[in-house]
Structure formats: structure tokens, C-alpha cells
């Protein structure tokens, strides 16, 4: 028996929560749908997305090809379904990698004051490089592969997380409970993990959702420019890039993946917003002014 | 036409969002006449602020009056439109708050902020007329050099001056009623006295009525004509101030009056000459080291402080804000490194010891902070918070958790606290937990940095009792930092009086209270609210 069925109060609370934060519901539903689409792509009336049929080029939507076919006769619906995997992987990977690395660097900068100046100047330096240009450089240096694209997008996102983390660490560090822990002789690493980390997590997690949506957008832009994921792997950006010459004949080649990118980014952003509303009162209560 | 400015009858306020209609205050009746100061006294949660907010019509959303009436100069306020309430606020009634800094706009000069009121409410007034009014208001609230001071920004003024500006703004449109919500709680004693004098003076000169909210019976004794005592949303007792103070009818009122610290001085105790801590010529300068200069710019926060602390002794460090008492405490507990001087803990000088070596000595000095809401990690269960100190000093988990049980018992709490989170406790309970946590590493010295200042008087009395008890049972030495001379007088064996970073006087509590040598100490003593009344109570 699962926890949820064992506990009707859990259900009631969840429903109440969703009613108070409709954005949270919208975000979760859309993102869950995208995840189902990505995971279950092979079973959702799809064919091999790379299978080329020269005689079936640029067909309009039909019962066989739900969204029609592209200029090489590949099934657009299959390409979009499989392409969602790339977007979601990139979004999740970039968000979690930049979150973990940024958190570590940011906490070190916030706690060990001697390193603060150096770390933050390096971060300012990284932030000064335009994200897209840095990504283009990394991809052209190391070649187009999914991992390279993830690294290329993650790099410029790290300083944002570092800055946010550091600023929250600085406020939490001044809290009396941190000083009490110091006066009890708590070693610095334990201080960071037990007393500081749990109290700075909320705003950083919210930031991570925005990072995820930005990553999905940047990946699509990179692929559209032809420097993202290799063109044989279907991704929403690639599909749009392939379709751009045939926009007048088959506008769905751009419109369908474009709408999906927009919908996903919107859902992730709204989820982040409602997470902030949900987590912030708590955050405000723990570090807010009570003097 | 009655001569009451404000008449509240059977007022009840409830949480309207709640299906159970939880009442916050009920059956509150009080009145304020001309030239009268009515004090509403109670502890936090007694509903005294809710009462004043309902008069102003600024209850938080979710709260609403459900019964009774509030009449201002004969006009019913309950059910009055938002527009009408807006018209009344300012010309008929005005309010001042506890923290003047947050109530003032930081990017406007205070003069402009007063002038703004006239611009909104009296559009016909000429600019030079407004300037004249602003200046005369600044004079009215006894601001020094009014012409120049109104050109300053809020952060350039002291707390007392800011509160005077707030009062000037409140009086700008000559309201009949002034509501003062703990207006002196955030101020130093000497400033508090000046503000109380000012309010009394304004009442006499302008014939306004004042509804004065406070938790401090000392303040009541200074200022009130009549008193309304509230508890848990209801009026417990009311009557003329003299009568309530001298012959309280209710046990609760009695306990509040008794809880006012300083009603008795402790008996001088004999303390063995066993010096635990010796501080010599301690100084601290906050260096705001600029990008291009390495010279510290700020004035020293602490200069040449020397003191001794003996086993079993409670040493009070008294001073107003900015006197350096907290800096001294933070240097001694080594939350900050002093710029120069020595801190001898037994034979070791910890003044400038490196953090890694210092960790071993940290267990001997533990700190209890002012605000119990912020001194416990909100995401850590009490049990985990209590074992932390012991475990840092190499005590096993089992033993540490046994010990945390004993500690809780020691501070008068039971085991069920172990699995709960800090927000599930009241302020007083949290402060007890903080004390238990500080005791976990078996310190010799407890530094209590304003440890009772954020608590209600009755809770304050309990925590003070606890500290006294711990001192005698464990032989602790306590460094008790406070701005409240009355608290210090009640608890401490010896006192150190500080002013602008220096120690001006130190001596046994009784000597210092009865024969202060320095004029500053004398001022501090004279400013303690309720002094005359308490002196009478003491002799009675």
C-alpha cells in the first residue's frame, strides 16, 4: 500500500496546495506530459525518426504521419517525440550540474572569506563572455556531441548560481545559530553542510528551474544555428533548422517544434515562479528581519 | 457630545477566513479622554496591538471586527468606508510605531517627508507656509537645531531623533488622538525617557489623547493616567494608573508588576576569588579596509577594556546601543578577533589565537544570543541541535543524547522537545533550549548577549531565575550583557558600565546603584522607567 492511499490527509493537502497555486499544477502537468512523451516515444505511434523516404517528402499531416513529413521524408511527429528527449536531458543536466558546482563554489566563497575575492572575480570574468559565443567556441573546439553541448551551456550558467548562493550564504552566516555553532567549535565543513546548506537551498532550487528553461532555449538556438547536437540526432532545434527553407510549403516543420519549446519553457518558468511563492515565505521567515 | 476622544465598546475581532471564527480579542472596552494618556499593557499575544490596529482600520487582511463599536469623536469607525477612514487618519487620529527607521523613507529628507503630508492633505498651502509649519513642528517635538535637522536623511539621525520626526509627522494635521505602539521599546533608556517626557508634554500643551501600547509596567508608571491590562484578547483590569499600580485587583496584573525587573536588588553574596577570565586592555577597531588604502577608517568600537570574571559570579555589562558592550562580548567569546589586548582563560591567552587551536578552548565559553527566533537552526530538530556541541568535543552519540535529556530537564523542559523543530516552541522555551545547548559542552563561562531583551516580562523573569539557578548549581560564571539597568540590577553581582567603547565605571551592584560615581551612570539610573514608583514599592 502506498503512502498516498494510506494517508487521505496527504491527498487533501496536495489538492489544496494545487488549488492555491494553479501555476504549480500547470507546470507539473506540462512537464510530466513532456517526460512521458520522451520516455514513451517508441510506443506513441512513432517510426524510426531517422528513416529517410525520398518519395514521401514534405507530405501534409495525415493519419499515417500525424504532423506530416520533412524535406527528407522523415516523420515529423516521430522526430518531435524523440527530440523531446534531447531538450529534457539538456535542461535537467544543465540545471543539476550548474546547481551542484555553483552551490559548492558559492558556499566556499561565502564561508571562506579569503577566497571570496578571487572566486568572485573569476566568476565575473566568466559572466562577461556572452553565453552563446562561449557555447559556439566550446562546440567548435570539441565537436558536436550531446555532452559537449551540455558542458557548453552549463559553463556560463555556473556564475549565476555562484552569485546567488554566495549572497544567501552571507545572510545566513550572520544568523545567530551559525555563530552559536561556531562558538561550539563546529568544524567548518560540518558547519557548511548542517547549518548553512539546508537554509540556503530554497532560492537556489528556484534558480535551477530558470536555468533549466534557459538551457532548453539555448540548446534549441544552438541546434537551429547548426552548431548544437549533431544533425542526425533529432532535436527540436535541429528540426526547426531543417525546416527553415521549407517554411512556406510546410510551416508545421517550424511551428510544431517551436510551440513545444515555448510550452516547455513556459511550464518550467511558471513552475519556478510558483516554487518561489511556495518556498519563499519560509525563506523569509528564517532569514527575514525580526528585530 | 461626550468629552471622550475615543470610546471602544465590547469590541471583538476575529479571524474571518477561519470557519471556526477564531476570536483574537473580545469584549474590549476602553476610552481615551482629552489630555489623557491611556496605557494598554500586556504581553505579546495579548491583543493590545490588534486593538490599536482596529482603531486605525489597519488590521491585517483576514482579521476583522465582528462585534462592538469604536467611536472617534462620536463617529462610528466600524463599518466606515475605506475612503472615510483615509480622511480620518491624519487629521483626526495618527499612529507612531516601534521602529522609526522602517517607517521613514530612506531616500527623502525628513523635512520633505513631513512636508509631503501637507501637500497631500492641504493642497492650497503655499510652499513657504509648508516650510514654516515643518519647522515649527520640528521645534514642537524639541529637535535640536530644527532648521538643519529637517534637511537630513533618516539614517543621519539617531533613533530618538527619528522617533521625534515620526511624532512630528503624526501631529502634523493636529489629530485629536495619537496611538503609540511601543514607541520607545527600540530605544535606549535615556532616549526613552526623553521621548516619554515629550509625549507627556505634548499631551499637556495640545490637549490630545494618547492610546499608549506597551509591555513595560515601568513605562506605565512613568506616563499613564489610566491603565488597561490585557491578557489573551480580553481586558483583565482597568482603572486609574495610581490605583492599578498600587493596588492591583487581579493576580495577573500583580504578577506583571512584580515581573518588572529591578524591584529588588540581590543580596551581596560572597564569591571566592577564583578568577576564570581576565580581560586586559582589549580593543577592537572595525577596519573597513578600502580597495586602495589599508588604514582602518572607523572609530574604535572598543577601547582598553579590562575586567575580571570569577567562578560563580554574574557580571553585568550595561550600556546603550553603540557603547561597545556587544563587541566586548563577541571578542571574549571570540566570534570576532580583537585588534589588541589579552583575553586570559586560565593560563592561555585566546585573544589572537588561530581558529584551529582555538577550537579546543571554545567549549569553556558559550554564548546565548538575544533573539531566540534566530539562534536555533530552523531545519534542525532540538535533539540534533543539543548533541552538536558535545559531539564536537568527542563525546559519543549515545552519551551525548543522554546528556541532552538531562540538559532539557535542567532548563525545565521535557524529553518530548527532542524530536521537535524550533518553530514549534514559544520564545521563552526557545531561549531555554538555547541555554541548554550552550551548557552541552560544560562551559565555565556563559556569555548572555541581551539574552532576555526579546522576551516578555514574565518570561524574562523566568529565564533570569533559570540563569541564577544554573549559576548556583553549576558554579557557572555569567557575563550578562544588557541595555536594561533594571534587569542587570536584579541579577548581577557586579556591574560594568560602558559608554562609546570605553568602560566608564565598574563595581558591586549595590554600590553602583546607591552611590554612582560617574555622571553617565547617574543619568542611566535616572532614566530607568518606573524608578520612582519602584523605589516606593521597594520601601513599602
Image (cartoon, coloured by chain):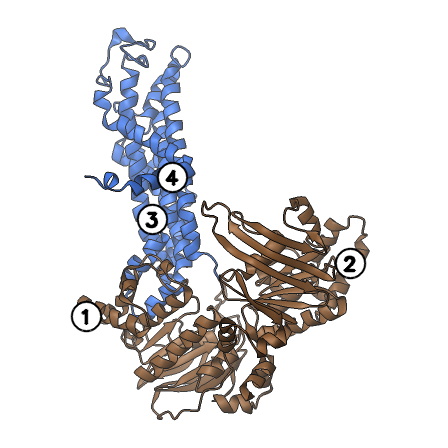
Residue linked to disc 2: B131
Query: Is residue B228 among the parts visible in the rendering?
Result: yes
Helix or strand or loop: what does disc 2 sit on?
helix
Work out whether disc 2 and disc 3 sit on a shared chain. Answer: no
Task: Identify the image quadrant of the N terminus of chain B.
Answer: bottom right
Nearest the eye: B207 or A192: B207
Which residue is under mark 3? A102
Which chain has been coloured blue in this picture? Answer: A
Q: Residues within 10 Å of mark 4 (few under 14, many from 20)?
A: few
Kindly identify which chain the residue marked by label 3 belongs to. Answer: A
Place of residue B172 in the rendered image (x, y in percent of width and height, measured from the top left)? 73, 59
Q: Is residue B50 above or below residue B322?
A: above
Please state the horizontal and vertical placement of residue A222, each as a whole percent of the image: 35, 30
Find residue B517 and report its image quarter: bottom right
Q: Distance of mark 4 from mark 1, alpha carbons?
A: 44 Å
Marks 3 and 4, how far apart in space? 34 Å
- Disc 2: which chain? B
> Residue A16: which numbered mark, if any?
4
Q: Nearer the viewer, mark 1 or mark 2?
A: 1
Mark 1–mark 2 contact, CB under 8 Å? no
Q: Are marks 4 and 1 on the same chain?
A: no
Amino acid at each position: 500500500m502506498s503512502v498516498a492511499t494510506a494517508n487521505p490527509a496527504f491527498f487533501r493537502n496536495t489538492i489544496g496546495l494545487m488549488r492555491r497555486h494553479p501555476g504549480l499544477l500547470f507546470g507539473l502537468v506540462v512537464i510530466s506530459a513532456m517526460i512521458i512523451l520522451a520516455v514513451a516515444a517508441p510506443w506513441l505511434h512513432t517510426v524510426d525518426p531517422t528513416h529517410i523516404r525520398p518519395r514521401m517528402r514534405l507530405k501534409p499531416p495525415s493519419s499515417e504521419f500525424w504532423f506530416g513529413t520533412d524535406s527528407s521524408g522523415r516523420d515529423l511527429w516521430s522526430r518531435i517525440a524523440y527530440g523531446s528527449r534531447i531538450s529534457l536531458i539538456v535542461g535537467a543536466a544543465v540545471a543539476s550540474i550548474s546547481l551542484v558546482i555553483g552551490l559548492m563554489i558559492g558556499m566556499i566563497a561565502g564561508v571562506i572569506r579569503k577566497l571570496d575575492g578571487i572566486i568572485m572575480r573569476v566568476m565575473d570574468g566568466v559572466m562577461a563572455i556572452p553565453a552563446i559565443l562561449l557555447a559556439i567556441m566550446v562546440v567548435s573546439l570539441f565537436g558536436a556531441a550531446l555532452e559537449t553541448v551540455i558542458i557548453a551551456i552549463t559553463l556560463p550558467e555556473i556564475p549565476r548560481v555562484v552569485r546567488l548562493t554566495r549572497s544567501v550564504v552571507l545572510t545566513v552566516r550572520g544568523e545567530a545559530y551559525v555563530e552559536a555553532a561556531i562558538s561550539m567549535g563546529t568544524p567548518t565543513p560540518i558547519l557548511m553542510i548542517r547549518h548553512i546548506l539546508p537554509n540556503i537551498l530554497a532560492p537556489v532550487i528556484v534558480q535551477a528551474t530558470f536555468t533549466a528553461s534557459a538551457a532548453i532555449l539555448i540548446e534549441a538556438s544552438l541546434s537551429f544555428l547548426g552548431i548544437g547536437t549533431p544533425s542526425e540526432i533529432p532535436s527540436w532545434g535541429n528540426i526547426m533548422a531543417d525546416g527553415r527553407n521549407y517554411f512556406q510549403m510546410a510551416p508545421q516543420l517550424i511551428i510544431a517544434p517551436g510551440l513545444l519549446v515555448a510550452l516547455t519553457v513556459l511550464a518550467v518558468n511558471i513552475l519556478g515562479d510558483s516554487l518561489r511563492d511556495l518556498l519563499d515565505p519560509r525563506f523569509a521567515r528564517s532569514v527575514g528581519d525580526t528585530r | 457630545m461626550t468629552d471622550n476622544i475615543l470610546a471602544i465598546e465590547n469590541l471583538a475581532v476575529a479571524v474571518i477566513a477561519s470557519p471556526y471564527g477564531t476570536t483574537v480579542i473580545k469584549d474590549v472596552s476602553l476610552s481615551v479622554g482629552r489630555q489623557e494618556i491611556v496605557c494598554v499593557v500586556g504581553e505579546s499575544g495579548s491583543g493590545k496591538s490588534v486593538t490599536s490596529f482596529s482603531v486605525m482600520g489597519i488590521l491585517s487582511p483576514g482579521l476583522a471586527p465582528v462585534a462592538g463599536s469604536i467611536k472617534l469623536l462620536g463617529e462610528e469607525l466600524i463599518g466606515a468606508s475605506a475612503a472615510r477612514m483615509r480622511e480620518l487618519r491624519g487629521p483626526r487620529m495618527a499612529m507612531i510605531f516601534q521602529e522609526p527607521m522602517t517607517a521613514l523613507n530612506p531616500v527623502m529628507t525628513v523635512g520633505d517627508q513631513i512636508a509631503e503630508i501637507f501637500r497631500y492633505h492641504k493642497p492650497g498651502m503655499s510652499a513657504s507656509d509648508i516650510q514654516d509649519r515643518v519647522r515649527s513642528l520640528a521645534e514642537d517635538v524639541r529637535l535640536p537645531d530644527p532648521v538643519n535637522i529637517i534637511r537630513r536623511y533618516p539614517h543621519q539621525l539617531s533613533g530618538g531623533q527619528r522617533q521625534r520626526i515620526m511624532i512630528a509627522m503624526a501631529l502634523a494635521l493636529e489629530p485629536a488622538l495619537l496611538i503609540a505602539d511601543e514607541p520607545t521599546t527600540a530605544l535606549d533608556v535615556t532616549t526613552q525617557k526623553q521621548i516619554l517626557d515629550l509625549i507627556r508634554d505634548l499631551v499637556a500643551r495640545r490637549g490630545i489623547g494618547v492610546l499608549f501600547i506597551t509591555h513595560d509596567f515601568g513605562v506605565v508608571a512613568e506616563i499613564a493616567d489610566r491603565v488597561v491590562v490585557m491578557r489573551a484578547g480580553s481586558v483583565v483590569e482597568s482603572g486609574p494608573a495610581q490605583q492599578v499600580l498600587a493596588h492591583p485587583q487581579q493576580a495577573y496584573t500583580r504578577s506583571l508588576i512584580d515581573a518588572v525587573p529591578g524591584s529588588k536588588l540581590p543580596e551581596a553574596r560572597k564569591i571566592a576569588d577564583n578568577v576564570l577570565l581576565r580581560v586586559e586592555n582589549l580593543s577592537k577597531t572595525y577596519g573597513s579596509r578600502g580597495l586602495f588604502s589599508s588604514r582602518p577608517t572607523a572609530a574604535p568600537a572598543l577601547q582598553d577594556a579590562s575586567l575580571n570574571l570569577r567562578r560563580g559570579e554574574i557580571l553585568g555589562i550595561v550600556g546603550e546601543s553603540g557603547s561597545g558592550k556587544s563587541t566586548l562580548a563577541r571578542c571574549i567569546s571570540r566570534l570576532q578577533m580583537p585588534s589588541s589586548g589579552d583575553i586570559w582563560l586560565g593560563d592561555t591567552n585566546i585573544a589572537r589565537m588561530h581558529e584551529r587551536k582555538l577550537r579546543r578552548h571554545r567549549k569553556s565559553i558559550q554564548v546565548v544570543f538575544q533573539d531566540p527566533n534566530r539562534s536555533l537552526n530552523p531545519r534542525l530538530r532540538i535533539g540534533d541541535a543539543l548533541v552538536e556541541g558535545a559531539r564536537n568535543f568527542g563525546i559519543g552519540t549515545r552519551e551525548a543524547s543522554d546528556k541532552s535529556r538531562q540538559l532539557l530537564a535542567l532548563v525545565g523542559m521535557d524529553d518530548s522537545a527532542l524530536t521537535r523543530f524550533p518553530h514549534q516552541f514559544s520564545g521563552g522555551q526557545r531561549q531555554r533550549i538555547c541555554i541548554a545547548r550552550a551548557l552541552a559542552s560544560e562551559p565555565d563561562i556563559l556569555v548572555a548577549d541581551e539574552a532576555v531583551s526579546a522576551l516578555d516580562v514574565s518570561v524574562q523573569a523566568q529565564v533570569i531565575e533559570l540563569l541564577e539557578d544554573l549559576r548556583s548549581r553549576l558554579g557557572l560564571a555569567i557575563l550578562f550583557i544588557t541595555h536594561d539597568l533594571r534587569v542587570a540590577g536584579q541579577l548581577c553581582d557586579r556591574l560594568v558600565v560602558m559608554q562609546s567603547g570605553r568602560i566608564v565605571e565598574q563595581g558591586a551592584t549595590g554600590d553602583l546603584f546607591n552611590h554612582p560615581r560617574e555622571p553617565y551612570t547617574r543619568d542611566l539610573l535616572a532614566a530607568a522607567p518606573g524608578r520612582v514608583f519602584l523605589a516606593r514599592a521597594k520601601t513599602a
